[in-house]
Image (cartoon, helix red, strand yellow):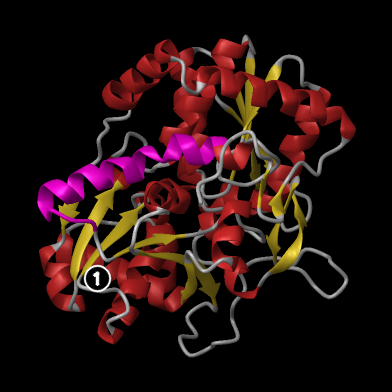
Amino acid sequence: MKQELKSTKFGKYGGQFVPEVLMPALEELTEQYEKYKDDPVFNEELNYYLRDFAGRPSPLYHAKRLSKEYGVKIYLKREDLVHGGAHKLNNTLGQALLTRYMGKKRIIAETGAGQHGTACAMAGAAFGIKTEVYMGAKDTVRQRMNVYRMELMGTRVIPVKSGSQTLKDAINEAMRDWVANVETTNYMIGSVVGPHPYPTMVRDFQSVIGKEVRTQMMEKEGRFPDSIVACTGGGSNAMGIFHPFVDDDLQLFAVEAGGGGLKTTDKEALHSATLCAGEEGVLHGARTKVLQNKYGQILESSSIAAGLDYAGVGPELAYLADIGRIKPCYSLDSEALEAFHDLCRLEGIIPALESSHAVAYVKKAAASGELGDVVVINISGRGDKDLETVLGMNK
């Protein structure tokens, strides 16, 4: 069931729907990744940075008080403890190292919540590579501390004022930049989206999460969990923890943002739940599930969590949803906010609002028994960046 790099598609999804001028850059990137992904020298250096710079492995924590409250045994994969506060660094260290091996002198990237941009800034600084990050103007306001963090590390943050001024528009601008500067620049996508090889490459770099969980669960329980739950926007943290378990007998829950503001009962508010409500289309260089109107125009997504505010989803997730290997589901803004407070109060852990969506789904699904007895939740990031948002919603 697992996808090999040489295939550009996941079933009918994926591919390379890009301007002809970008094809040489994608071909070069594919060739270089295939060359180095199993290279022992490359991987020894990457593992050094993952261990000594990023702080891996991240703990798998038995959340006893949350487990008692929700009625199911819960383990938290603590990606919030990775340097920078999110899983994003796993991928950016891999792509930045590849950039250096390719001889490129400049990194560009896009970011929504600011975590990928921050991780790019960290990796760029660590490797001494010039870094510039495109970010929707709306996101630069609601995630201004991450903007400052990027600037502290020498990264130039470029606000994008077109369209919805969020993640999809930042990706558009980053791709335009790459078209104009392909010879000197490597574009580091932050999720399992975009044209081949990005969905596969980013998934592979993030799969360190699930590989660690396999070992940690055997040490703690002597078996794998009954289910794994991860928030899903583009899908990098979800595929990172899901992929090593795709061929195993357990359930995988991809929790999207339902939006809805604080209208808990507004079940029509599936503004960002692409796997649940999207239709097949092309977005940012790949065929996948997309939020679109009847004319094929991309709809604006809406979520309390900037990192889930994306009108598409990774093509591999779309494929896994179609074949029934993952279960798409969603949490509303109000439910995520409630779960955010639960984890703070019961465990002393402040989760990102993105991760809070996964916690929220476990809260409402545990009683039905569909999760089984033992659940792993991927806490993809910490919530320091969201405190102003939460404070504003509590007023």
Q: Is residue 198 magenta?
A: no
Residue 279 rendering spot, x and y as whole percentages: 72, 69
For the record, the magenta segment spans 201-224
* Amino acid type indicated by mark 1: Asp
Residue 152 rendering spot, x and y as whole percentages: 46, 26
For label 1, count other residues whose C-alpha is less than 10 Å away and answer few (under 14), some (14-19) or many (20+). Answer: many
Task: Tell me the chief SS of the magenta region.
Answer: helix
The quadrant the C terminus occupies is bottom left
In terms of image quadrants, where is residue 225? bottom left
Residue 67 rendering spot, x and y as whole percentages: 16, 70
Residue occupying image coordinates x 75% and y 36%: 175
Up-down: is 271 above or below 129?
below
In terms of image quadrants, where is residue 62? bottom left
Up-down: is 58 above or below 264?
above
Residue occupying image coordinates x 61% and y 60%: 318
Secondary element at image label 1:
helix
Using residue 333 as the reference point, say whether residue 171 is left or right of it: right
Residue 44 rendering spot, x and y as whole percentages: 36, 15
In terms of image quadrants, where is residue 45? top left
Up-down: is 141 above or below 339?
above
Residue occupying image coordinates x 34% and y 46%: 210
Residue 148 is at least partly visible in this image: no
Using the image as rendered, state which of residue 391 and residue 324 is in the foreground.
324
The residue identified by callout 1 is 342
Q: Residue furthest bottom?
A: 265
Using residue 289 as the reference point, say whether residue 395 is left or right of it: left
Using residue 330 as the reference point, say whether residue 139 is left or right of it: right
